[in-house]
Amino acid sequence: MSKIEDVKGLVETGKSKKVAAAGLEALGGGDEAKGILGAMGWAMGVVGDKFSAGEIFVPEMLIAAKAMSKGVGCAEAADGGG
Amino acid sequence: MNNRENALIALRGGIPESVPCFYSACQIVIPGDGFDVPLIGSAAAYDGYGVHQTATKESGGAFTPTPTATPVLTDITRWKEQVTFPDYDAIDYEKIAAQDRAIFNLDPENFVQDLFCANGMFERLHFLMGFENALMAMMEEPEAVYDLAGAIADKKIEFIKKAAKYYQPDYFTYLDDYSHKTGLFMSKNTFRELFKPHLKRIVDAVNETDMNFKMHCCGKMEDLFDDFLELGITAFDPVQCVNNIPEMKKKTLGKVGLMGGLDVQGVIDMPDISEAALRKEVRRCIDTYAEGGGYMLYAASTHMYNPAAYAPTGPLGIIIDECAKYGKNYYQK
């Protein structure tokens, strides 16, 4: 599995403590910051759909958003401060 | 049969003579220890857990955490260091219970005595941390949340023993809102893992006394209803109209009392609501929810702590009057 898939999964499951490291690994593996940001946006879309369908609740949504925020910070820093 | 006797039958799931109305059949008892909420009459104060609360006009004078105050708990894993707990043994409950009886004109001969124990485990968690931080802590550090909820439950159980001894109410109402207008704040699994085991201890502690346990859970809580029933809970409020109350009653008739139904957000607490609309809402509730008994008219309204609202022309006075007329001898027709 590519590192960018890891980032997606970590955002979707709200693993904010791991997402920055996974993002850096993806960058180190040759993925572009823009691609990582897109992957995280896609993951948040999945989270939103699950919330709308009643499969997850506000707490799961909040930790996913927190993970995305950590990941965005990492990708922006790698991209020269956004 | 007086209003109290009539209401007690409904709260136990039975068929009374008339449809009871909470505002004319029950008296709210709020312990004057200042622990779960600051003392009535304070504009703002710290509660027994060190949370600064303010009574706002928007909440009808009810206390909520002061938005500008720093949260007491900033790291859920450090709750033992950061949270202070109320000391129930430091309070002279014999004295304050006597004061409360006088202040609230408590009349246990004629009114059901309903003691409100505010801010249950979930509410206390978000009072301590702030709402978003509490919800995230439930996901990120569930073991710590479980332990803190257990410590809060232990304190509730300490208070239950004091309440039974010094207040002797008919109902011990445990307030903890797990839901909002359209659904739950958390998944059923999260509730079951973090709160339900401790809630069972609280329910059992009440059931060991002469008090009856009543669960207060605002919002659309029907997805937790089976869990609550499984815990042996036999009375509920404010069972809001966003729930399918007729469907819930199929599970409760003859065993469990439901108190609620009035549309608090759409009718009762609307500014400038007309007398006709209030009377119509009372009739809707009776027509829709009263059949078979086990029902008491109620809404957790922001008017409840305003004595003027109980005047004949006040919103609660109008509700009392319409229920007395339309619901009179409803079950003998």
Image (cartoon, coloured by chain):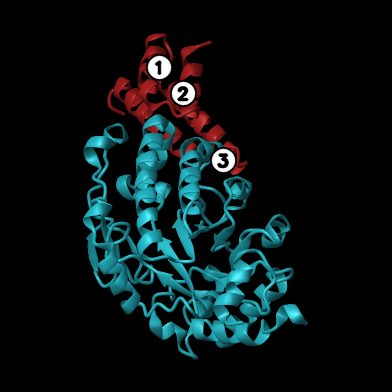
A63 w.r.t. A4: above or below: below
In the image shown, does A50 or B99 lie closer to the viewer?
A: B99
Q: Earlier in the sequence, mark 2 or mark 1?
A: 2
Q: Which residue is mark 1?
A: A22
Chain for mark 3? B
Q: Which residue is mark 3?
A: B188
Disc 3 is placed on an element classified as helix
Would residue B51 be visible to someone looking at this image? no
Tell me where residue B172 appears, x and y as whole percent: 46, 60
Disc 1 is placed on an element classified as helix
At label 3, the amino acid type is Lys
Near mark 3 (Cα within 10 A), the count class, few <14, some 14-19 or many ≥20, is some
Distance, label 1 to label 3, CA atoms, is 31 Å
**Which chain gets the red colouring?**
A
Q: Are marks 1 and 3 on the same chain?
A: no
Chain for mark 2? A
Q: Which residue is mark 2?
A: A10
B96 w.r.t. A20: above or below: below
In the image shown, does A29 or B134 lie closer to the viewer?
A: B134
Tell me where residue A20 appears, x and y as whole percent: 36, 21
Near mark 1 (Cα within 10 A), the count class, few <14, some 14-19 or many ≥20, is many
Front disc: 1 or 3: 3
Residue at image location 59% in from the left, 47% down from the top: B224
